Image (cartoon, rainbow, N blue to C red):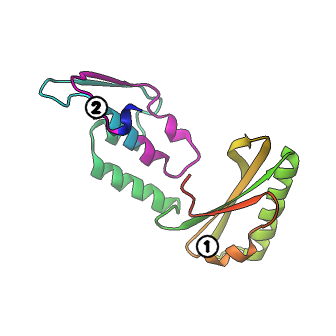
Amino acid sequence: MVAKGWDLGRVRLVGIVNADTSLHFPDYRSGEVTFSLITQVAGRAGRGDEPARVILQTYSPDHYAVRHAVTHDYRGFAHDEIRVRRTHRFPPYTRLVTCTISHAEDGAAEASAQQAVERLSAILGAGAGLDVLGPAPAFLQRLRGQYRWQFTVRGEEIERALPHLPRGRGWSIDVDPVM
């Protein structure tokens, strides 16, 4: 809440507890989120003429997002982040489609996701420039009494996969997912 840009006067000490929690979310943007939150929260201290301190608690002090946030090195962070995304084939170098199945029974959701992955992988074939990642439990595996499993298609021409994605009851498809 403090990171949201409030101008709180006379703040001389800011503590950021578990600053790296967002690094461990299953999201390719986790480094970006972590860097942003640390720099925003740290920016609440020392807005006047008096000196201020920021105390940072982290289990990942060597992670590039944390290292660059500590020194407010935006260019260094951007350089490292874009290198990681290029290496691992994440946006902006590729596009993503996430397919999620929801079902009242966990085993049925997992089986549906596995069948969809096997079918899609067979259709796309190896070397097609599209990767099928998963299936895996969704980050929030159980939501509103439904178990959720998902898989992701990653590649430069994801449009080729769209006609072959599973459809029907329980399935949702998210092209270029934000979360």
Query: Which stretch is magenta?
Result: 5-34
Amino acid type, callout 1 = Ile
**In the rendered view, would you say 85 is above or below 158?**
above
Of circles 2 and 1, which is in front?
2
Which residue is painted at 77% across and 63% down in the image?
Answer: 117
- State if disc 1 and disc 2 touch (CB < 8 Å): no
Q: Position of residue 116 (x, y in %)?
A: 80, 64
* Circle 2 Cα neighbour tier, 10 Å, few/some/many (<14 / 14–19 / ≥20): many
| Nearest the eye: 67 or 99 | 99
> Residue 12 colored magenta?
yes
Q: Position of residue 138 (x, y in %)?
A: 69, 47
Question: In the drawing, does residue 43 fall left or right of residue 22?
Answer: left
Which residue is painted at 50% across and 40% down in the image?
Answer: 23
Local secondary structure at mark 2: loop
- Mark 2 = which residue? 44
- Mark 1 = which residue? 158
